[in-house]
Amino acid sequence: MQGLSRLFSHLYGVRFAPAATAPGEVWHDDVRRLDVLSDTDGHIAVVYCDLFQRAGKNPNPAHFTVRCSREILPADIPHDNDGMATAPSASGALYQLPTIALICDFSSSPSTTGTNTPPLLAFHEVTTLFHEMGHAIHSILGRTAYHEVAGTRCATDFAELPSILMEHFAHSPAVLALFARHHATDAPLPQELLRRRMLASTHLEHSETYQQALLALLDQELHAGPPMEIASSTRVYAQLEAEHALLAPGYVPGTAWQGFFTHLFGYGGLYYSYLLDKAIADRVWTAVFANDPLSRDAGERYREEVLRWGGARDPWRCVGSLLAREDLAEEAAVAGRMEEVGRWGIKEQIK
Ligand SMILES: [Zn+2]
């Protein structure tokens, strides 16, 4: 959390301050409150962190917007301002204070590891925390007139851009140097260890990408026509495996695991969002942040072109302005831009 606070301080001039909670304010003793403080605007958001697994708790990491940001007009403020939480802004406009719940499922809870050992996160858990915080910062820095379009309430296939981009920050040596130290010796994270870990995960990443592409195709097939025309989702899945067949053994007869894949109805034709946003996030990372992941100029540019808009601006305009590719937002680009982003996603090492 300190590392994330330092990162956001570099990029956006905002930081986290732990805050005490009032009786009844949180739903469990594990929940910690962070106030988000801005150098220019003061108190701009509240984040409740519920990070450790426990019986009866949903294991899926998630970000919930309890209350969205929105502009508050003078006429909205009740006469006695009975507790309406507001966040000022440098422009003088008043915003509703966004309130966010960040849920993870980390196993090393302080209560299970003993009092003297801090919770030690695996690398993939750090990545998860950064991912969810990417959604949170979208909600925190949103500055839209209406709450329906605040932060993460943007086009579904654009909503994973800020979170996947944060995974790049989680893997950046410059960012890890802000906080990643041995809990007992205080030694910094060895760069060689990080390099080997990143190398090992690229192999896994390729098979994951294939699996995601296959599921995105299945999702498209299942939602392409009237549902009654799909006699068997298993047959469609097996057919796709046979067509693409990149990984042995392909479809295993008698299995139907896609029946457990709830994203197929949760996303309803939008499961490709992860791959699309991954390709865009890779491009944004390379073009905007890779040279200096702590650059305030880059952070401000990204905030101004993407984060503040939520769903109140065409996402292609956001990405186009950020990457100095205004042509992506033009009418004529509609047919070709998805294909272009697809090409961004093809990594050179895949032959
Ligand atoms: Zn996400």
Image (tube, helix red, strand yellow):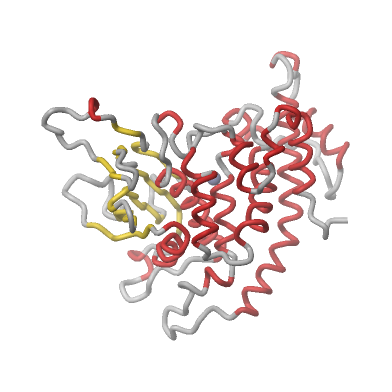
Task: Identify which residue, 227 or 282, lies in the foreground.
Answer: 282
Residue 106: percent from left, percent from top: 45, 58
Task: Identify which residue, 153 or 20, lies in the foreground.
Answer: 153
Task: Identify which residue, 210 or 112, lies in the foreground.
Answer: 210
Please determine whether, in this image, residue 36 is positioned above or below residue 73: below
Residue at (81%, 37%) from the top-left corner? Answer: 253
Residue at (78%, 37%) from the top-left corner? Answer: 339
Residue 282: percent from left, percent from top: 67, 53
For the image shown, how many numbered marks are present on the structure? 0
Please determine whether, in this image, residue 250 is positioned above or below residue 5: above
Quadrant of the drawing holding the C terminus: bottom right
The answer to whether residue 105 is left or right of residue 216 is: left
Quadrant of the drawing holding the N terminus: bottom left
Residue 154: percent from left, percent from top: 52, 34
Image region (quadrant) for ligand 1: top right
Residue 164: percent from left, percent from top: 59, 51
Extreme residue toward the front, this view? 91
Residue at (75%, 48%) from the top-left corner? Answer: 345
Residue at (65%, 42%) from the top-left corner? Answer: 320
The answer to whether residue 3 is left or right of residue 196 is: left
Extreme residue toward the left, this view? 80
